[in-house]
Image (spheres, helix red, strand yellow):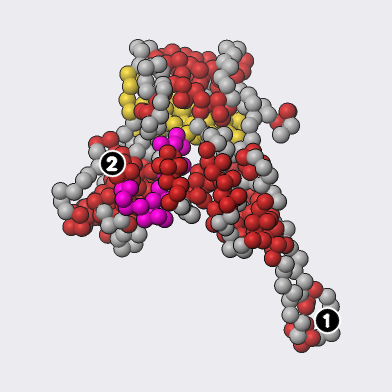
Amino acid sequence: MRPEQRRRGPLSWSSGALCAVLVLAACGREPQATVPTANAEATPSTDAAAATPAAPEDPLAQARRFVEIARTGALAKRPQAAQRLGTLGEPAVLALHEVIGTTTRDLARVGPELLAPMGALGDEALRARLWAAVVDRDFPYRPAATQSLAETARASEWPAFEELLADPLSAVRSSTLAAFGVLDAREREALVVARLEDTSDLVRRTAADLLARWERPYALRWLVEDLARSDRFFELESGENARYEAARLLRRHFDRELFGYDPAEDPSAPGNAAALARLAEEIDRRAGADGPRPSARVQRSSVSVTGVLGLEVRSCRRGEFHVAIGDDDVLRIGLGHPVEVPLEPGAAQRLAALLAERFPVATEPQLVGELGCDLECYRLRTGDGGALIVRVMKGPDEVPDLRPAHLDAVAAALLAELPGTLAADVAVPAAEGAFDALLDAALASVGGALEPEPAASDAVR
């Protein structure tokens, strides 16, 4: 990336502009390999053309073609090319070794799609590269690498998989559970049961689905709880997202109609309320009315989180966080049933004054950087009482000092209000240290280290 591209000012983030970017990306087309056929040259008759069979493509050339499509082809075709590559055996192994280099940074440059066939092909050297990527906390595609290893899990790898159940990335913890299913590791059921109380609803749903497949129908109750969610984080419909994902999984265990349940409708709608009751009855019939049930912390929620400032951080290296400071001087962490932590009096007022100075009026949503897997999303109240969303985004490459100074000031002010005694495991299972240090590290991995500059001229206007 050229130095002049490393720091960008805010760009308009209208829905039309975003759709245009995504459509343009999806409309790219990979170059088609030329396969000699009888019709490649003019022929005197169609009968003569039909009499000449197409020459078979060299296996290594075919593997190289699929590698290129999986790396740079149309977005919709990349997974298909990677899947085909995983069936080609030794030619695919050779083609992959030609492009993946020798370091995890080299491997990151080929993108996430090629990680799946690296596990499927059974090559020891490729598998070693996947494990090296998974344990490298700076590798941007750790969930995909974990999924590749878990879907081809070996019993000898149990210690490594068990350690990943405490990983800071929820997508890594969720992907790790696939190994338990692949190896049918029912003797390790307690480890899966523990994930039913994970701080991430993604991990909880994955664990519940696996346990249900292991003939533990009580676990379906965790999925039904997500069907009944209507919680929000500012404008983010976290409850609705959970409903769709839970319904998708429950259809594996019930009739596809789910007694008429519709995730697009509010859980309290008459049809959905009746469906939820029927599902609960059926689970009681299968599991017994006295079986295990979700704790209050992971039950259905209708909490709507708002406030003077909401921060969402999704770092493909350091984890995912949802943090808000309300007008009541309460810090809320997480989705669904957020953890609530009282702050020093005046915290909300101090933040509101800073935001009013830096963001005097509401504008269209802003984007700093470019579309990628790393995200900081600031949902803030402007000086005129309106609302503004500012996103800082980047891809797998490091971009120093991506976050503008006025957002540095906002993030630093938020961190300054957090209690230094708040433990990190409030957001990430088994995490050590303080939560403010954990959040600071996640911010540094996305927008760079915080360097607040108080000049009001930096504000987005």
Q: Secondary structure at mark 2?
A: loop
Q: Residues within 10 Å of mark 2 (few under 14, many from 20)?
A: many
Q: Which residue is mark 2?
A: 300
Residue 211: say if magenta. Answer: no
Whether residue 188 is in magenta: the answer is yes
**Which callout, 2 or 1, points at the residue further toward the start of the chain?**
1
Based on the displayed image, in which of its 4 quarters is residue 42 positioned?
A: bottom right
Q: Position of residue 190 (x, y in %)?
A: 29, 44
Q: Residue at x 48, y 54 (%)?
A: 152
Query: Looking at the image, which residue sits at the far left?
Result: 290
Percent position of residue 400, x then y: 64, 26
Badge 1 is on which residue? Answer: 43
Question: What span is colored magenta in the figure?
Answer: 166-189
Disc 2 to disc 1, C-alpha distance: 69 Å
Quarter of the image with the C terminus is top right
Check disc 1 and report its element: helix, strand or loop. loop
Q: Is residue 366 visible in this depiction of the protein?
A: no
Q: Position of residue 380 (x, y in %)?
A: 47, 25
In the rendered image, the vertical position of residue 191 relative to residue 52, given as above or below = above
User: As drawn, which residue projects farthest toward the front?
Assistant: 156
Viewer-side residue, 269 vs 80: 80
Taking the image as shown, residue 339 lies to the left or right of residue 434, namely left
Query: Which residue is at the front of the view, 3 or 124?
Result: 124
Amino acid type, mark 1: Thr
Name the kind of residue labelled 2 in the image: Arg
Position of residue 345 relative to residue 274, above or below, is: above
- Residue at image coords 37%, 20%: 422
153 relative to 22 in the view: left or right: left
Residue 63 visible in the current orientation: yes
Pinpoint residue 333: horizontal percent, then vertical percent. Answer: 38, 28
Residue 154 sits above or below residue 383 on the image:
below
